[in-house]
Amino acid sequence: MSSPENRQYPELHAHLLPLLKEMIRNTCVNTGDPDSGFEYRSAETLKTFFTARGIPSEILACREGRSNLLVRIPGTRKGAPSLMYMGHMDVVPARKEDWSCDPFEAALIEDAQAGPVLNGRGTVDMLNMTASMAAGLAEAVENHGPFPGDLCFLAVADEEASGTYGAKWLTDDHWEKVSADYMIAELGGFFVESRRGRSPTITLGEKGIAWLRISVKGRPGHGSMPYRSGNSAARLAELIVRLGDSLGRPVMHPMYRTMAGGFAASRWEEFLLTNPNTFRAGLSRVWGRSKGAAKFLHTAACTSVSPNVVRSGDKINVIPDRAMVELDVRLLPGQQVQDVACHIRSLAARMGIEVDILELEFFPSTVSPVDTPLMDAINEERKQEPGSLVPMMIGGVTDGRFWRQKGTVVYGYAPFSQEMTMNRYASMIHGIDESISLASLDRHLRFFSQLPGLFFQRV
Ligand SMILES: [Zn+2]
């Protein structure tokens, strides 16, 4: 116990690090198979952690092995709003041979950029947060409680698939147990470089999902005579290109404008990014200095269309009479799946193409307001730090959407230390050699232990 890191971060070594290491070693790998995940292991780890600190918790499961764990500490004032920390316990697979350390060993190593780091699958997505939330909540209760409203912690299963055994089931079937007025969940707290310096991000909203299967009909024929054959594969390719151009035009919605303001390196760049006619030019400038930032901005402004599964024909000399594409469309606030289907139908009709559209999955975009007591409390907690929070709308989905859709204010945020830039974060999430610095973990812990006091003062 006398290494320099131990002396530097005594609280981490006493509470948070042992908990996080055990959660990494529990290997709760979610492959998408209903029998994977094994989140019951980390639910038990967390239950033991809370029991040792005198905090009751409840395990909820709709399938054996896929446990969720809930802590709800009742508030002292009737009608006061509740605050919940929500994190997932599952991680995506990792292959030992690709990593420099065993991804499920939870080794402490030295990183040239970040100093001492904990290496392992889930150290960024998102066992770092789930463990810090648990340790922070325990500290908050001990040092600052009781609070007027309910203070809750929820660790869920199955985020890395679709939340069937976790967030979706809990919000559909156990809303009375897992409801909350305000929530901190995943994705945010890493830094972007902007004209205001290095600023931390916070996620306020997520795009929606419209997954569609589109089939195009043609006529079969001999591959040696394609003249006016109406080859279904060629027609589908044309349709896909035109769809990307027409659906993917930028929309300068309020959430995007705020985000562009926070990402821009100059006023001029902000001007370019927030005008539909100069948007592409602005985006190219951003791409030049940060590919990650350009991708985030593009998806926040545009309905994105990604043709990810394409099939047609099975013989090289036969013109295919059917072609199919599965499109991953991500929706902007207010867009419905019907809007997209209508657009595709009318475009196809104008091109003289007959299409069938099958809706595979739909979830609308969800956005939380910026002006809330939770945002005030977060700003208060970080008032000594440089830069101001940059709000984001992300293209991917997290479990936070299930609560946002029911009216909960959900922010994705856990402050990292300065080394966690957007590019470093993007390279680690679902990547190899995922790791978190002890400085970042220390920052997480301080945030989650201070936030309840600051939030409940304001409500
Ligand atoms: Zn995650």
Image: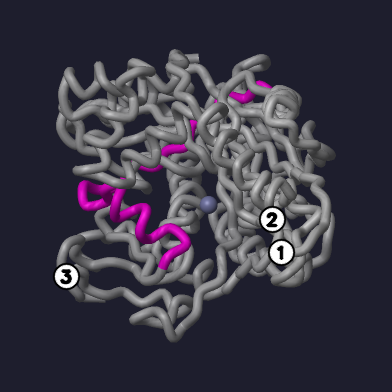
Q: Is residue 446 visible?
A: yes
Q: Mark 3 and mark 1 in contact (Cβ < 8 Å)?
A: no
Name the residue: 37% across, 63% down.
14
Name the residue: 17% across, 19% down.
268
Q: CA distance from mark 2 to mark 1?
A: 6 Å
In the rendering, at what x and y percent does residue 88 appear? 59, 53
Name the residue: 60% across, 61% down.
90
Q: Mark 1 and mark 2 in contact (Cβ < 8 Å)?
A: yes
In the rendering, at what x and y percent does residue 365 appear? 61, 28
Q: Secondary structure at mark 3?
A: helix
In the rendering, at what x and y percent does residue 8 appear? 19, 61
Q: Mark 3 and mark 2 in contact (Cβ < 8 Å)?
A: no
Q: Closer to the observer: label 1 or label 3?
A: 1
In the rendering, at what x and y percent does residue 155 appear? 62, 51
Q: Residues within 10 Å of mark 1 (few under 14, many from 20)?
A: some
Q: Which mark is residue 226?
A: 2
Q: Secondary structure at mark 1?
A: loop
The kind of residue on which mark 3 rests is: Pro
Q: Which residue is mark 3?
A: 4
Q: Secondary structure at mark 2?
A: loop
Q: Residues within 10 Å of mark 3 (few under 14, many from 20)?
A: few
Q: Which residue is mark 1?
A: 223
Residue 451 or residue 223, whichever sits in front:
223
- Which image quarter: residue 332? top right
Upstream in sequence: badge 1 or badge 3: 3
State yes or no: residue 374 in magenta. no
Q: Which mark is residue 336?
A: none
- Left or right: residue 229 versus residue 22 is right
Q: Residue furthest bottom?
A: 97
From which residue to which does the magenta span run? 406-431
The kind of residue on which mark 2 rests is: Pro
